[in-house]
Amino acid sequence: MKAAIYTRYGSPEVIQIIDVEIPSPKPNEILVKIKASSVTRADTMMRQGIPKFGRLFLGLFKPKNTALGTGFSGVVESVGEQITTFKIGDEVFGEKLFSNGCNADYLCISEDMVIELKPDTISHSQAAPICDGFLTSYNFLKDIANIQQGQHILINGASGSLGSAAVQLSKLVGAKVTVVCSAKNIDFVLALGADDVLDYTKVNLNELPYKYDVIYDAVGKLSYKDSKKIISSDGIFMTPVLSIQILWQMLWNSKQVKFTATGMKKTKDLKRLFNELVHFFKQSKLHTSIDRTYGLSDISKAHQYLETGRKVGNVVIVNL
Ligand SMILES: NC(=O)c1ccc[n+]([C@@H]2O[C@H](COP(=O)([O-])OP(=O)(O)OC[C@H]3O[C@@H](n4cnc5c(N)ncnc54)[C@H](OP(=O)(O)O)[C@@H]3O)[C@@H](O)[C@H]2O)c1
């Protein structure tokens, strides 16, 4: 089978497509024939080995895990002898977290991981990136902010994968949603359900005459220090983007400033959130936006596109 790997940190050109044996599932694993997989900003950062302190976990001089790709959707090809949840032919999707290996033709995954039956309401391409934007943003909105009906949220970077998911999830609970994007993406974010749109090239957010209950800086471009005056006294500022600055600010104001990484959460809690998301997708209450699709052999081009910082929604690898 074909699989995308990287054996050193660097530009998208470090990615190679190699031939490897199709893996055999262990007793508690299933073998999935992958139909679609995600390419995410987290993947591009792991490939580059940034931020550099992340190399303490990823591998100091070269990546310890050379496989690429965290989100997948596909069909169960075979099952280990202890498997009770899935059977051959089931359409499944989920996330391999830091173990990667989804940008390939097949993967083995334990049934205890973040994996569910794919709803018929969505395609494999729509399912594969759900654990990036939706699962990450749902964790922030539900488990961290506990956002409620009537609260006012400001979402910065609403045109990205996490932002576009956050707009829909916030509207689902009945929050008032103001989003920030550039002029070319205004129609896109309005179609997701945003109530108000601010163009970040024209508006200075820190001078707005409003106070928000929640600021979700999905692309890590704002500063908590500068945003303080537009956060209500019991409001919070959250971002999924790790920086020394955000860790420092969390140290001094852990109640109002929040960063977390999906991969830091216990699998059982991720499964709970994922299960709820699947329920919403079954009811067609959420929608995955796909910007571009690529074949596995063109995965370097997908990484190049992500690095422009201009993607709208999600980028997906489709296996033929
Ligand atoms: N903590 C976690 O567990 C976790 C999990 C997944 C991802 N992440 C992180 O989350 C971040 C967001 O990823 P993503 O895939 O949603 O989006 P992304 O690809 O990083 O961002 C793309 C979007 O951001 C918009 N944008 C660029 N500059 C902006 C600015 N100054 N203000 C507002 N919008 C701006 C772009 O629109 P324009 O072209 O209009 O500018 C584009 O549509 C990444 O840094 C990723 O590493 C964290």
Image (cartoon, rainbow, N blue to C red):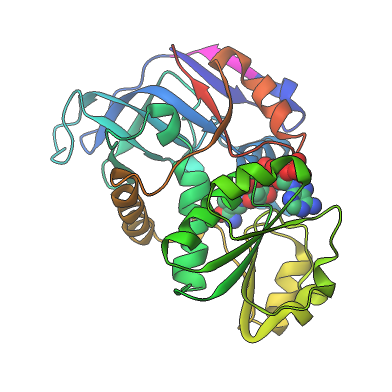
In x, y percent, where is residue 195? Answer: 59, 60
Query: Residue 68 falls in which quadrant of the image?
Result: top right
In x, y percent, where is residue 76? Answer: 25, 26
In this picture, is 29 found above or below 271? above
In this picture, is 50 found above or below 24? below
Q: Is residue 27 left or right of residue 263?
A: left
Q: Which residues are magenta?
A: 16-20
Comparing 209 with 134, the one in front is 209
> Can residue 50 be seen from the camera position used here?
no
> Can residue 107 be seen from the camera position used here?
yes
Q: Main secondary structure of the magenta part?
A: strand
Look at the image and tell me in which quarter the N terminus lies: top left
In x, y percent, where is residue 303? Answer: 68, 28
Residue at 62 percent of width and 58 percent of height: 240
- Report how many numbered discs are placed on residues in the image: 0
In this picture, is 249 found above or below 90? below
In x, y percent, where is residue 6? Answer: 64, 26
Comparing 112 with 164, the one in front is 164
Residue at 62 percent of width and 15 percent of height: 298
Residue 292 painted magenta: no
Q: Is residue 255 left or right of residue 22?
A: right
Look at the image and tell me in which quarter the C terminus lies: top left
Residue at 39 percent of width and 21 percent of height: 35
